[in-house]
Image: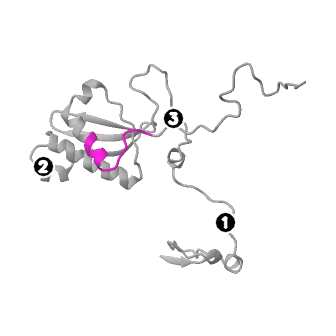
Amino acid sequence: MKSCTPAGIQIQVRHFGRSCLTQQQSTINAYPVQLTNRNPRNLERLRIDRKPEGWPLDTPSRAYWHKIFVTETSRYFTAYVQHNNGRIVAQASSKEGSFQKRLLSLKDSIAAETVGKVLAQRLLMMGLAEVHSDFGPEEMQSEKVKKVLKALEESGISLKEPERYMPPAQHRGKPADEKPWDTVLDS
């Protein structure tokens, strides 16, 4: 770690073979002109990124940024969070070696709860605190799905994503017959 002091502020910066301050910058108290945000989820976290909407009667719904899926095979139990572009963001499964060493059964409700806790920890480490859960009534009858969702909620993961922020439109909410270009003269 190398310490740099632009404009009198103490900042810790990793040193990658170049000095973080050039000679010209160190003599002038100048701020950088252009900042580059390299976080691909920044617009989602600000709630201004576009959500794919699909059709109103689509089941399951497509209006999400991150959605949780729970799958159960004959031998294993898996829970994962998928981004709306199809990429799996985080995953926890009872077929991982650490689960196999510590659990007696890889498919019971204790394994489901443990998978939920591990997935929640991985999501929090990634900075995701909200996921979309869209389970039908048949899936919610499963005790294992309930255990996974309960473990996620207890660990601090919200199972409802926030709504997309829409900037206030200037003419939204006005009656249809009132136009902004119509002028009314009071006489």
Name the one closer to the observer, 6 or 149. Answer: 149
Q: Which residue is mark 2?
A: 103
- Badge 1 amino acid: Pro
Q: CA distance from mark 1 to mark 2?
A: 53 Å
User: Above or below — where is 39 with respect to 110?
Assistant: below
Q: Position of residue 148 (x, y in %)?
A: 25, 41
* Element at label 2: loop
Q: Residue furthest right?
A: 187
Q: CA distance from mark 3 to mark 1?
A: 32 Å
User: Above or below — where is 117 with respect to 61?
Assistant: below
Q: Quadrant of residue 82?
A: top left
Instruction: Give the extent of the magenta segment.
Output: 149-161
Q: Position of residue 127 (x, y in %)?
A: 42, 53
Q: Which mark is residue 51?
A: 3
Q: CA distance from mark 2 to mark 3?
A: 39 Å
Q: Position of residue 36 (x, y in %)?
A: 60, 57
**First in sequence: mark 3 or mark 1?**
1
Q: Which residue is mark 1?
A: 32
Instruction: Evaluate whether residue 95 shows in this view.
Output: no
Identify the residue at image location x=69%, y=75%.
Answer: 29
- Badge 3 amino acid: Lys
| Residues tagged 3 and 1 counted as in contact (Cβ below 8 A) | no
145 left or right of 37 in image: left
* Element at label 3: loop
Could you tell me how many numbered marks the image carries? Answer: 3
Q: Residues within 10 Å of mark 3 (few under 14, many from 20)?
A: some
Q: Quadrant of the C terminus?
A: top right
Identify the residue at image location x=23%, y=45%.
Answer: 115
**First in sequence: mark 1 or mark 2?**
1
* Element at label 1: loop
Closer mark to the observer between disc 3 and disc 1: 3
